[in-house]
Each structure stands twice: as structure tokens, then as C-alpha cells.
Amino acid sequence: MTLALYVPRRSVVHRVPAGGKLLALAALAVLLFAVPTLPVVVAALLGVLAVGLGAARLPATALARQARTVRWWLAGLLVFHTLFSDLPTAAVTVLRLLALVLAAAVVTATTRVTEMVAVIERLCAPLRVVGVRPARIGLVISMALRFIPVLAERADRIREAQAARGGSARGIRGLRTTVTPLLVQLLQMAHTISEALDARGADDVPPARGRRSPAPAA
Amino acid sequence: MRFRRPEPRPDAVADPARGIELRGVSHRYGDRPVLTDVDLHLTEARIGVVGANGSGKSTFARLLNGLVLPTSGQVLVDGLDTRASVREVRRRVGFVFQDPDAQIVHPTVAEDAAYGLENQGVPTAERAERVTEVLARYGLAGHADHPAHLLSGGQKQLLAIAGVLVMRPARVVFDEPTTLLDLVNARRVARVIGELEQQVVVVTHQLDLLDGFDRVLVVDGGRIVEDAAPRAAIAAYRALMERR
Ligand SMILES: Nc1ncnc2c1ncn2[C@@H]1O[C@H](COP(=O)(O)OP(=O)(O)O)[C@@H](O)[C@H]1O
Ligand SMILES: [Mg+2]
């Protein structure tokens, strides 16, 4: 599993604010569904590739990896529309999805998690009225991204330890014998994590003020 | 000066010369005593803490920055009571845990290093500058944008240390910082600790980490049973363990 989506580079695309990139992504989606013609879709796809591989200097593998995750879906759409619609519709549908997936990949590969989270925090700012602290939401998202790989690693280690003693990690039984010790480890770890947050001043956050970005006028 | 914000409590005046004082401190979890009658005044630059598993070392360490509050007695840091001024105390006393994975809370290296500064409300530009500086100091400059889970164990512990030191605490407590590391990385972390200008309290089972320390405490059954220079204290600790 990899969540290492960000590809550090010095490029114009990287420097565009996260909010701008997300808006552009949304605009592209609207355009492609509003004007679903082959020239527009092909132009969009080429444009995305030009921005990703050219302007942002991303490695082709970074984009290919994302395309691969939807390859069966693309194949399914292609077959479905070829059979039940016509070839041009099939082409438009498949290329449109591909363009959007690659565009999303370009945005995630050129935007730090922090910036993305800051946008989410800004979007959540109105929730302040009902007492929610947007900074807390941001922290939760960051921590989820941080601890998913840690969890996967711990689960692997437990499975290894069981395999080393002749256990098998297959089937429901295997699942149960992995999950129980994993939960125990998690609970212990959660305690330390909360102490570590405290030790670094998690409660120090000045209220009524965003942690990462200047708060919008309140 | 170190003080960014004045202490909100006018009666609590900080005096950095006072160090850390424990006055008649006891701690119990439920009705189980874990530390009993600890009276200490810690002013030395390098203080070690040794003792068997379960003797109360981690509880002792956590008392020093208010992560654990004493059930009786008082802990004062620079004259500030950990009970009354816990935030200010935590700004003065950094804490590094044994397991680096449990203290790195952000997905990438630079983001994690910045976490404490965000909490303190340090402005973005200064934050970036201090993070760059601290990552360079601990050999992590080239990893700023890398996912933290791709670092080696030693690098993770260095990141954990960086994330604490970037906040510029006057004192740092380490709870078994090298226990999970291999020899090379343990030495590296030991060297980093040795070079700190801060007052340092280190809980450890790796006795060579205590070379050159000013004072070593031996904890046994929740009591400080020895308090001396490293050589004498370690000899007493060995004798104690052999009697088991
Ligand atoms: N949060 C807790 N709740 C209950 N008991 C605890 C807790 N933390 C530690 N203890 C118990 O207190 C004793 C001392 O623990 P600790 O301070 O972690 O010792 P050490 O770090 O020397 O191994 C142990 O017996 C431990 O089981
Ligand atoms: Mg301990």
C-alpha cells in the first residue's frame, strides 16, 4: 500500500494553491460532462498529460499507477458502451474517466497533504459556529494518513510472528488471530499517541484561529 | 528571551534557575502505588534514570512535564506547579518517547516537524525556517517531503527528537529513546542527546548512554534507592539486580 502520492518538484503546478487546483479539477469535470464530445475529451486528456508530465515534470509512472487502479473499470465501460451504445460513446466515456483520474492524480502528486488539509479546514470553517474546531478535523485527516501505513506494517508483523510459529493467516480464523493482537497494540499505541500530542502542545492551539492558515474573517 | 507569552497566572513567576523540584511526590494508578515519597531537586545538565521494568521510571519521567500529575506532593518546573501551569510546563519540558511511530502524527517529515510550532501559533515563515534548520541538524533535510513511514527506525527517532527540539524547550525528558534501535542508530541518537544544550533527563537500559552524565537515579519499586554519580549509581544498580 502506498500513500506516498506527493512527488516533490519545483514547478509552476506545484506552486499553484491547493484550492485553485481543486477548483480547476472540478471545472474540468463539469466541462467534460457538459460537453461530452470526442475532440473536447481528447483535448482534455492531452492537456492533463501536458500539465502533469510537462509543466509539473511528474514521472509517467506516478500517473500510470493511478490509471492502473481503474483499468478494469475502464475496460468494463468500454465493453458495455461498445455493446449497448456505439463506439464513439464508448471512446468518450472511457477517455473522459481516464482524463479525470489522471487530472486528480496530477493534483494529488503536486499538492502536499498539509495544503489539501488546509483547504478542507477552510471549507469546514463555517462549522465553527456549532463549536467544531476545523484544525481538529485537519489533524484527524493527517493522522489517518499517517497511521494507515503504520497499521498495515504492524498487521504484517503480527502475521509474520504467527507464521514463524506455524500459524496460518488464512481465512476467517487467520483474520481473527491477526485482528485481536492488532487491536491490543492499537489501544496501547493510541494512549501513547495522545500523550505525544499533549506533549507537543495539542491543547495550546489558540482558539478562534486556524492552525495552518490565517483564519477567514470571523 | 525564551518567553513568547507571559504566564497568565501572575502568582506563578517562573525562575529558570530553580530547575525541576519534586516535593513529597507519590503516584498511584487506582489503589496501586507506583511511586512513593520522591523528594528531588534536579538542576544538573545530564541526569540518568535506571531501574528494572515496571519500577516506575516512565511514571517518574511523565511527572516531569505534567503528562502524569502526582496523586500527592508537588512537581515544580522553574517554580511552576505542573498541576496549575501544565501548558507552560510542557513548553519548557520536551518529551521524547520510546516508540517513534507513536509520536510522529503527520504523514510527511516536514509536516510532522512543524506540528508543535503550529500549536504554539508560530507564524508560517518562521515555522518553515525553524523546520528546515532542525531537519538539517538531524540529517533529515533530504527527506522533508518524504512519507514518515518510509524512514528507518533511527531516522524516525531523530524526527521525533526534531519535532520536540524545534519547539526549543529548556529541558528534554527521554523515555528509553534507544531501546527499539539497532546499535548504530542508538549511538547516533546518543550522540544527538549528548550534544544538546538543554537540560536532559534520560530513562534508559543502555548504561553506556550515561557516560559523562552528572547524576544517575536508580528506581526500584517506586522509590529512588540510589542517587549518585554514574559510576557509583550503576554499581549500585548492578548489585541490586544481582540480588534478585
Ligand atoms: N496507565 C497506567 N495504568 C495502570 N497502571 C500503570 C499505568 N502505567 C503504568 N502502570 C503500572 O505502573 C508500574 C510502573 O510502570 P512504569 O512507570 O511504566 O515503569 P517502567 O517505565 O519502569 O517500566 C507498572 O507496574 C505498570 O504496570
Ligand atoms: Mg517505561
Image (tube, rainbow, N blue to C red):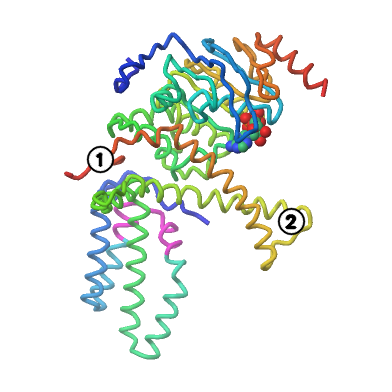
The residue segment tinted magenta is: A50-66
- How many dots with numbers? 2
Residue at horizontal 27%, vertical 32%?
A: B123
Q: Height in image: A166 above or below B176?
A: below
| Magenta stretch, overall SS | helix
Badge number at residue B93: none
Q: Does A149 sit left or right of B81 as displayed? A: right
Image quadrant occupied by the C terminus of chain B: top right
Question: Where in the figure is residue A128, as x and y percent of width and height?
Answer: 26, 49
Residue A161 image offset from top left, x and y in percent: 72, 51
Instruction: Tell me the residue that label 2 is attached to.
Output: A163
Taking depth in this image into account, of A204 and A178 the one nearest to the observer is: A204
Dot 2: what SS? helix
The span from disc 1 to disc 2 (Cα, nearest Å) is 51 Å
Q: Of marks 1 and 2, which one's residue comes earlier in the chain?
A: 2
Left or right of B86? Residue A182 is right
- What's the residue type where badge 1 is placed? Ala
The correct choice, above or below, for B190 with respect to A9 in the image is above
Residue carrying label 1: A208
Q: What quarter of the picture does the N terminus of chain B occupy?
A: top left
User: Is circle 1 on the same chain as circle 2?
Assistant: yes
On what subunit does the disc labeled 2 rest?
Answer: A
Q: In this rendered view, identify the residue nearer to me: A41 or B90.
A: B90
Disc 1 C-beta below 8 A from ligand 1 = no
When asked about the image quadrant of residue A52, the answer is bottom left
Residue drawn at 25 percent across, 66 percent down: A28
